Image (tube, rainbow, N blue to C red):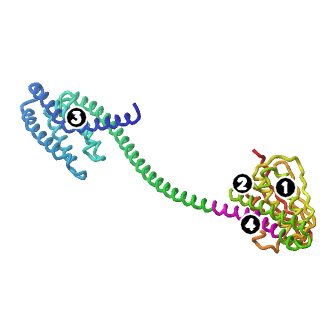
Amino acid sequence: MNEGDTAEMGTAGATTAAQWWERFFQYGPYGLLGLATAASAVSADLIMDRSDVYAAAALVPVVLVLQLWWGRYGPALPPPSRAPQFYFVARTSLALGLAWCSPFFSIFAVLGYFDAGRLLPQRAVRAGLLTTAVIMAGSQSGSGLPPAGLMNWVAFGIVFALHATITLVFAQIGDREAEQTRAQVDTIAELESANARLEQALAENAGLHAQLLLQAREAGVADERRRLAAEIHDTLAQGLTGIIAQLQVVTSIADTDPAVARQHLDRAAALARHSLNEARRSVHDLVPVALEHDDLVGALKKTVTGWGERHGVRAEFTVTGTVEPIHDEIAATLLRIAEEALANAGRHAGAARVGITLSFMGDELALDVRDDGRGFDPAALGPRRRGAGGFGLGGMRARAERIAGTVEVETEPGRGTTVCARVPLVRHG
């Protein structure tokens, strides 16, 4: 049996109990009145005199009429009506009169215990129960109502105390159950309100989530544009600059020294092929060409050697510490920073000597690019070249910051320039 079947059986059981009580309140009074009348008639010669018989014979039809009226019109009356209170008082008064005639009519009077809570307002329930207890105690004291002697009065007091105690205890229990029911209703209402607020909050969160997704998408697009712009600057722009320089040399010496001019044309073609491959890899966010077949040390050595040959500058590369295989992203970042630093030295420094040092220092990698060129005043640079957003010093800093690194520049006019990059050493694999 699953939970759904259990819930359905519980609901069916509750509905059956409610229907049973409705049937009892609809037909029970007639059955109890008939039983009490029959018992009184059988014992009339023993406990009733002629006046009691006549009184009972007169009151029973009145009770029937009252019951018929209530059974037909009572359930249809609106809640504010006082008809239920009138019905309870009238029926209890008639039951008292009948019990005065014969104690067996207490069988009918016991109805007051069952429906006082249904018919009377909360403040009058205990009074209705105590009145019913008086009728029941008088009928059970041995001589009917009123008690005939001292012993009957004593018995009446004892029985009444018993009935009153029991009814008041059950009334208190009923009050607590009613309070619990009201508390449950209030709790359910609060939960419904909380659910409504939660649904509203979820709807608002859904809107915020959609907005955040849009912003994240826009940020991703912007970041990808910055990446492509930086890659184009570091590959195509520098490659084209080198090609132009080589072609200018060819133009100036083509007539006087064809062999040297041919060497410069070959270098220009090699730069063009290199730049084309770099552009293709930048679009697909792959590693630089130099790292396809070499590690970072080998790629840096070739880059420094090739740059020195193209610019006619003495370029030296040094490695310190224990060389370790590092993550592709770390290697690509340091290689791009080195290329950018060398490009800046070639365009602006007028240096005669450049040195690059790669240092393995435990959990950190350091790349130092030094030249003995003319240097510059960092304060005289514009924001674009000095800070984030540019493709020179700012571009190098941005690359390092993407992998939790830093780039510092030390320079003075006439004293050369040193670019120092520090990045975490993330080992390959």
Quadrant for the C terminus, please. Answer: top right
Question: Residue 276 at x, y = what percent?
Answer: 74, 61
**Front residue of 42 and 2:** 2
Disc 3 to disc 2, how far (Cα)? 94 Å
Magenta stretch: give its range. Answer: 220-245
Residue 269 drawn in magenta = no
Q: CA distance from mark 4 to mark 3?
A: 93 Å
Kind of residue indicated by mark 4: Ala
The circle on residue 300 is 1
Q: Secondary structure at mark 4?
A: loop
104, above or below 358, in the image:
above
Horizontal arrangement in the rendering, residue 251 relative to residue 234 (left or right): right
- Answer whether labels 3 and 1 touch (C-beta < 8 Å): no
Q: Nearer the viewer, mark 3 or mark 2?
A: 2
Please name the residue shown 90% across and 54% down the image: 318
Which residue carries the number 2 mark? 286
